[in-house]
Amino acid sequence: MAADAFEPADAAGKQPAPPREMLVDPRFIRLADQFFGMFAQPARGGGALAVYLDGRPVVDIWAGWADKERRWDSQTVVLTFSTGKGVASTVVHRLAERGLIGYDTPVAEYWPEFAAHGKDEITVRDVLSHRAGLHRVRGLVPGREGILNYDAVIRALADSPPDPRRIRTSGYHAITFGWLVAEIVQRASGTSFTDLVRTEIAEPLGPEEYWFQVPESERHRIAKILRPLGPPGIRWNAASSVMSWVRPVRGLAEAGMPESFDELVRDPRVHDAVMPGWNGVFSARALARMYGALANGGVVYPERRMRGISTDAPEHLVRFLAPETIATISQVQTTRSRDYVLGVPIRFTLGYHRPVLMAKQQPRNAFGHYGMGGSGAYADPDLGMSIAFVTNGIGSMLTALGDARLARLAATAQATVRKDKHVER
């Protein structure tokens, strides 16, 4: 299979349309077969998979159903939950590279109100590594629709005391992370978060599908989330209320289970709001391209057809981040102590985490972000590879929290690249 080349932007500066055909480099046939087998029945929904290697796309495929009446196609996008944390974090790093943000600068220097209740020493690094102590979203703002109000949430976060456990270990900011990052970059730059996503991510890289607020004209492309979020047979609000009183899972309820969240994820108003911790809408192609740059020393090759110009010419490479920046943001920031929300040690880097693969050998320096339900993406600088998987058939038949599909696909992709490059184990 071969992909159509991306067309150049038109005179109005519009982004090139997605390719109409799939792409599978012959080395990745086994990976493609594995992916297509995941969506044999409509009940399993659909998804897309994309891989970049050494700055170029080598896999761009899709399968299954965007909803019960519509097949997944090249233009389908989907809500990917926490996968968007990686995109939001990348905006921070683009600004930090230009000196607009300092990782060890107190957040309050950009956002003075944030200093309330002893938060004056919390740094940007603390926020990116989930050590700000502001994990609680449950009850943060009143009402089931309260989290749609960005300004109210920002005021509430600024006026919240930090959890004292932040000094010892991380506490996963499942939903609040996105608001904290968005407000920091807005205060530091004087530009709205969504404009920064466009100018710092979408425009340099090419694809437009890096959305937290989805344009009305593009919402027909969003796949429908098929499975309910809550535990089977138990209503969301009842489950979250019970969990908030049970010590071992209390942190998870506080951090990731706001009122009526199971209904809110299907509310069209979600796509009007800025909630970068969970409401990012992407294509696998766009995610793989961003992480493809991060896996390839900060550069990727042009994706548009350039008539009469070699796209291999160094002067035409898309330079996204400096290698030194990538080396900094990929370093683990947290200790081996258990995360006080998730209950297990998590190796957070600056806005990302180490991926987990269904393989004996885990990547040493890879970083990215997985999302609830199974979507996710990451970069592996050691292999020069990125992989992204998005789906609306979230989780398994037992739970919507996640499953091992990306972990299995990534293991196959890793093995393929290692064999091709003769990488020692």
Image: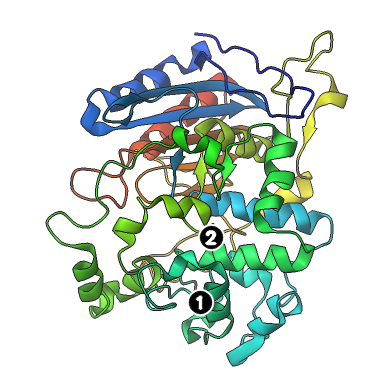
In the image, taking residue 96 as reference, residue 394 lies left or right, namely: left
Query: What x and y, as percent, mark residue 218?
Result: 53, 36
Q: Is residue 163 above or below residue 77?
A: below
Residue picked out by circle 2: 348
Q: Mark 1 and mark 2 in contact? Answer it, CB < 8 Å.
A: no
Query: What x and y, as percent, mark residue 50?
Result: 51, 28
Q: Is residue 147 above or below residue 62?
A: below
Secondary structure of residue under mark 1: loop
Q: Is residue 279 above or below residue 246?
A: above
Q: Which residue is at a point 29% across and 32% down the rendered structure image?
A: 45
Q: Which residue is at a point 39% across and 31% down the rendered structure image?
A: 47
Can residue 133 be seen here? The reply is yes
Q: What amino acid is labelled 2 in the image?
A: Phe
Query: What x and y, as percent, mark residue 118?
Result: 61, 91
**Structure colour scheme:** rainbow
Q: Which residue is at a point 40% across and 78% down the rendered structure image?
A: 142
Q: Residues within 10 Å of mark 1 (few under 14, many from 20)?
A: many
Q: Which label's residue is closer to the chain start, 1 or 2?
A: 1
Residue picked out by circle 1: 134
Can residue 82 be seen here? The reply is no
Secondary structure of residue under mark 2: loop
Q: Is residue 123 above or below residue 422?
A: below
